[in-house]
Image (spheres, rainbow, N blue to C red):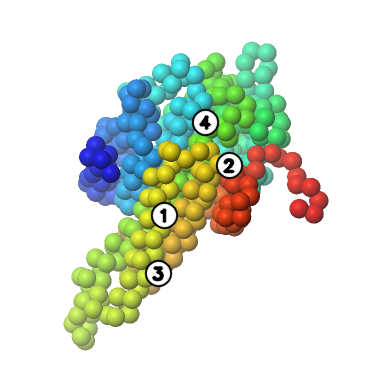
Amino acid sequence: MKEVQRAVVERAERLTRERIAPRAGEYDAAAANPVESWRDLWREGLLAGAIPESEGGLGLDMATYIAVIRTIARGCASTAMTVHMHSTVMRFIDAVGSPAQKRRYFDEVVRHGKLFGSWGSEPAVSLSRTLLMETVIRHDGRGFVIDGVKHFCTMALGASHYMVWCALDGGTDMAKSLQLALVPADSPGITTDARWDTLGMRATFSPSVTFAGVRVPEDGMLGDPGVAVQVGVIESFALGYAAVYLGIAESALAFALDYAKKRIVKPENIAVAADPTVQRHVGELAAHLDAAGLVLIDSAARWDGADLAELGPLANRAKYLATEVGLHVTSKVIQVVGGRGAYKDFPAERAFRDLRTCTLMPPTVDRMLEAIGKSALGLDTAMFNVSGRKPAAGR
């Protein structure tokens, strides 16, 4: 890693340690957006990490960006996840936006610290295999309007704009009909049930949202229909998720190591760390985390030079390993620590809840394994099918 890149990661490490991690528990308990943490990240320029330098951002290469997200996740999973969502919207704007859109929206982030959410999930559609949107965007003679319902709307009531994934005129073939639209958060017709009482990732605040005749601004149509799946950005969602998962798991293991070294047990009056069983458990977890981390680092390092067909396999292998290893580590840490690991006063409990919740993000484990297997067999490696049409019988 170059000196400039290392300095950015070190800045994220310092900010996470001093400001973001200490308030993570409060945001989790309140199920509230981590607003102060966002502001701190903006002041350090990190909200503009995925914005090109020519537009006032940091223009981070993927390896440095992933290192930053992983670092933030060690202190607060929800802050890392929301920043990753926001940053991915910046990548879409950079990839398919017009020069005028880039100037406007990037400026809102760089100069004013605005955040952008990405809303694609829907109540009746599974993204485990097929990319399909039932939220409809239509031209009504005066412009475009959106109608539909979205689930898991991250940063609701916190972001300034939402990138809404829609089906143009209700089409089902997303290769031709998928339309991204940038909608201001205060647009009339947007309502939310404000319900977000979940196991974990509580500070991402992701309730359901209904769009009823929501008008899209003149410069809100982002890219041509179908182009969003052709530019190699959708795959970066999964790579960032992997970074979040590993960051969470690393924080859990760090807590367990500190606890084991400081906790003295009787009648031996020795530290928990002296127990050979604990040593074996810690050794296993550390080795697994190292392995998953190396795959993530390798995928990120190869990302910027990869062609479109390679991105899905790179993301899938990193996310799969981070999912399986992260779930194992956060669960076993509580076992190693013992009863105190279940207390909300300690970070292991929150790490367990957050990891179990955020690993539900698509693609699923089964879908990732299927895609990894197809890649090994030299078959289609697309992360998602992009058509709503059903496969032929017998397939």
- Left or right? Give the position of 280 relative to 328: left
Alpha carbon separation for disc pair 2 and 4? 12 Å
Instruction: Identify the residue shown where x is 41% and y is 18%.
Output: 103
Horizontal and vertical percent for residue 156? 48, 36
* Numbered disc 4: secondary structure: strand
| Front of the two marks 1 and 2 | 1
Residue receiving disc 3: 332
User: In the rendered structure, which disc, 3 or 4, sits on the residue that comes first in sequence?
Assistant: 4
Q: Nearer the viewer, mark 3 or mark 1?
A: 1
Image coords of residue 282 (percent x, y): 32, 70
**Disc number at residue 121?**
2
Q: Are marks 3 and 4 in contact (CB under 8 Å)?
A: no
Residues at discs 4 and 1 in contact (Cβ within 8 Å) = no
- Give whichever of discs 3 and 2 has the lower sequence position: 2
Residue neighbourhood size for the residue with mark 2, other residues' Cα within 10 Å, grouped as few (<14), some (14–19), many (≥20): many
Mark 3–mark 1 Cα distance, whole angstroms, equals 22 Å
Q: What residue type is labelled 1?
A: Val
The amino acid type, in three-letter code, at marker 3 is Lys
Disc 3 to disc 4, how far (Cα)?
Answer: 38 Å
Q: Earlier in the sequence, mark 3 or mark 1?
A: 1
Q: Name the residue under label 1.
A: 295
Q: Residues within 10 Å of mark 1 (few under 14, many from 20)?
A: some
* Nearer the observer, 200 or 12: 12
Distance Cα–Cα, label 4 vs label 1: 30 Å
Confirm whether residue 244 shows in the render.
Answer: no
- Does label 4 or label 1 sit earlier along the sequence? 4
Q: Name the residue under label 4.
A: 163
In this rendering, would 225 be left or right of 389? left
**In what element is the residue under mark 1?**
helix
Q: Where 115 sits versus 383, above or below?
A: above
